[in-house]
Image: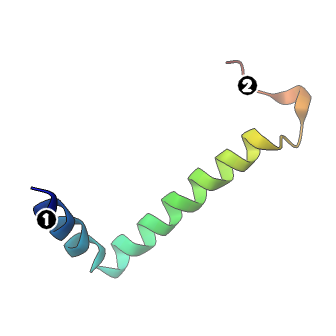
Amino acid sequence: MKKWIGAAIANWFRKPENREKAKRAAKQAYDRYQDRKNPRNPGNRPPR
């Protein structure tokens, strides 16, 4: 089962548009993490 999942993911990453989509998603997630870690406007934080 693990090999099948790995093969499916590897096959998905073969397409250039999927690689770009993954890069964008990773960058957005990292940017959100950095914004939470170091807020630029401390008074403008969303409610928890």
Q: Quadrant of residue 27?
A: bottom right
Residue at image location 75% in from the left, 45% down from the top: 35
Badge 1 element: helix
- Rendered view: 22 above or below 14: above
Residue 42 image position (x, y, % from top left): 89, 32
Residue 26 image position (x, y, % from top left): 52, 60
User: 6 or 30, which is in the foreground?
Assistant: 6
Disc 2 designates what residue?
Answer: 46
Q: Earlier in the sequence, mark 2 or mark 1?
A: 1
User: 9 or 18, which is in the foreground?
Assistant: 9
**Image quarter (top left, top right, bottom left or bottom right) of the C terminus:** top right
Q: Quadrant of residue 21?
A: bottom left
Disc 2 marks a residue whose amino acid type is Pro
Instruction: Name the mark on residue 13.
Output: none
Instruction: Name the mark on residue 3.
Output: 1
Point out the residue furthest to the top here.
Answer: 48
Left or right? Give the position of 45 relative to 41. Answer: left
Residue at image location 66% in from the left, 46% down from the top: 33
- Rendered view: 40 above or below 21: above
Disc 1 marks a residue whose amino acid type is Lys
Residue at image location 16% in from the left, 70% down from the top: 7
Residue 38 image position (x, y, % from top left): 83, 44
* Circle nearer the viewer, 2 or 1: 1
Left or right? Give the position of 44 relative to 47. Answer: right
Left or right? Give the position of 31 relative to 12. Answer: right
